[in-house]
Image (cartoon, coloured by chain):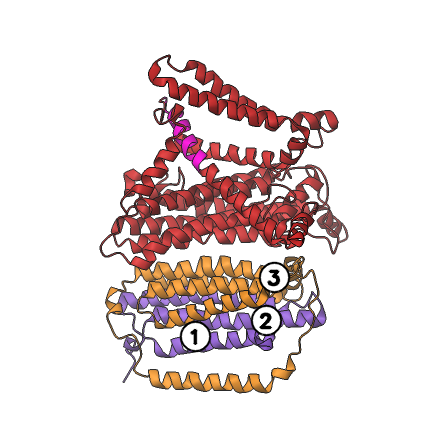
Chain colours: A purple, B orange, C red
Amino acid sequence: METMLHISTLHYMVLSAALFLLGVIGVLTRRNVVIVLMSIELILNAVNLNLVAFSHYWQGIQGPGALHGQVFAIFVITDAAAEAAVGLGILIAFFRNKETINVDEVNLLKW
Amino acid sequence: MNPVATPFFFYLLSGTMLIGGILVITRKNAVHSALALIAALLAQAGIYLMLYAPFVAGVQIILYAGGIMVLFLFVIMLVNLERAQKERQFNKQWVVGLAAAAALGGLFIAVYTKGKAMFPDRAMPSGLEGQNTQKVGELLYGQYMFAFEIASLLLLVAIIGAVVMAKKRI
Amino acid sequence: MHEFIQYVQSYLDSKLTPGAAGNVFWATIYILLVFVGLSVAVIAMNWLERKILAHMQVRLGPMRVGPHGLLQPIADALKLLLKEDIIPAEADGLVFWIAPFIVVLAAFTVFVVVPFGPTHAITDMNIGILFMLGVSSLSVLGIVMAGWASNSHYPLIGALRSSAQMVSYEVAMGLAVVSAILMTSLHGAGLYGAGVASAGDSGTLSMIGIVQAQQEQGVWFVFKFFPLGLVAFFIFAIAMVAETNRAPFDLPEAESELTAGFHTEYSGFRWSLFFLAEYSAMIAVSSIAVTLWLGGWLRPFPNLLHGSVWDLVFNLFPGITFLFLAAMCFYNTARMPKHPYFKIQTMGLAGFGALLGLIGLVMFVPAVFVRVQDIYWFAIKVAAFMYLYIWYRGTFPRYRFDQLMKVGWKILLPLGLGLLILTALMGMRAELWHWAASL
């Protein structure tokens, strides 16, 4: 109970791992492209949470200036925005061609 | 300022995030998934505030919840998903996918149980949230200036890419 | 019980906001006060909009329900609450139900950081302005959801247009805000004072900090680096009107174009939530404009007209305002028709005038006007913005959608960028001059 009540870095790491797993399951098992892209966003968020939790941990050791984790998280968010934009652009282009948004129907190159 | 009721807020916000995550990957209706993801992202912003990262929380709310999710909702509205809702939702290889995810989960559990002793608790310095934005700014424009410029180049490429991909005739 | 009273009293002479002091009781009290104040303001805005618009169009507006239509908002609220709740047949139930709540949530949460005085805010977040911009961008989500869930083409097109408009003008707003934030990091007092902060002392994103920077520099940011602050203020003023979907940028909800756009299928209480959220968002973005450019809670001319006499004159303004309103009420009471049918209305108006006069007299007591000063000046400036909103609605024709997007992207955005660069150059001119001279 004591471990449950005192929130430490490990709690945040476990939460981040759980979200990462949910995102991985979403990417691997869903057919709808939009939901796959949203699962990728879940994965990136899990990574961000881990980074910020560690930045908090290092602030306890090195003082208030150890914010490298947060800066990295900001870059990851920027990256996620760029990737979502391009991914959705590709989705629109593909939908215009094939009129479907299921991942397993993207099989024009299959022998 | 002393934190108030940290365990309560942590479990509340992390519960919201996990439930949101589960709803994202299991809903048939893509709009419901998007709403669940928005709830998860806002809860994550709350967790960032608990971790004394107000600037990242603000960026998360503006960019992720207010920007990327609006983009997702636009595309969901433009792409007609009515037919997709009635089809089979999960892949043919969902068993393999779940097995792979379970293996990954096992790996995480093994690493965390072995490495639990590596993170002893320390007392946090006070007044952390007062100068957060300033310090993030100092790092971003000092040590990570090059990465910052590359990120802006990346955004330029993404803009051009998105415009080109969505055009009817290039 | 005794320590509860201790807890409550420990805040009373602190110099921090309740959020910063960690005092949950007072934070709740402040939240309730802001909520009540906001509701009263929205009700007043409803009446004011109809009357002022009517008078601008040389007609009278509501006159029947209560003296000069003063009870009209209450009648409207009653009607909306009692109306039948119609949901379209194929509408997505959950999303249709949630959408108005998200818009209201976004509009109301913004007020957590709005500073009515140096300690009169619910909390003073380190990222105050970023929080406000971010949370107000969440209302786009509610609008998109409302349009989509209605399962009908007018709301869908209205929602798409409205969200595209809001997202475009958020960029212009953000740039104007950044150039105001840039000015907070300068030290030099006066209109063109530069003087970059030394290491360790920097600009700030917190709303209270921005107003305090204006106080230190002795100039409202709207006049700083004239005309740069003024142009930034204009960019923000235009973008905020577009952000809240108000005339002349109200194509997405115009009755003649899209049969009320994204809230076409909403009736009764749900529609009133959208309407509440729209007015709250107007007050919220006006608060941002007032805090960033017009000096927040600072009274006009604190340096030019200083000294205890001028202080007393400006301190009397709240009382004078209320007495002026009471005088207008009494004047209109005298002008009421002398028919027995109007007896109740005349008495009501006289009573309202007496109430306003009483508040005005209370505001002349020194203990009261010292405390009320900051809130009064802030409220007066926001009220001026509300009047401007109504004035725009009565004056300008509506923008067509492509013209609207053109203004947002091709005119305001480059202007905002150029302004940001110019503000930075003006702020750093001493350092740049030294560097150029040393070459």
The residue that mark 3 highlights is B4
The residue that mark 1 highlights is A23
Callout 2–callout 3 Cβ contact below 8 Å: no
Residue B63 spot, x, y in % from top left: 49, 59
Residue ID at (35%, 78%): A29
- Left or right: C221 in relation to C144: right
Amino acid bearing label 1:
Gly
Circle 2 crowding by C-alpha within 10 Å: few under 14, some 14–19, many from 20: many
* Residues beneath discs 2 and 1 located on the same chain: yes
Q: Which of the marked residues, 2 or 1, is nearer the chain's N terminus? A: 1
Amino acid bearing label 2:
Ala
- Magenta stretch, main secondary structure, is helix
Residue C394 spot, x, y in % from top left: 39, 30
* Residues beneath discs 1 and 3 located on the same chain: no
Q: Chain of mark 3?
A: B
The residue that mark 2 highlights is A53
**Region rendered in magenta:** C43-58
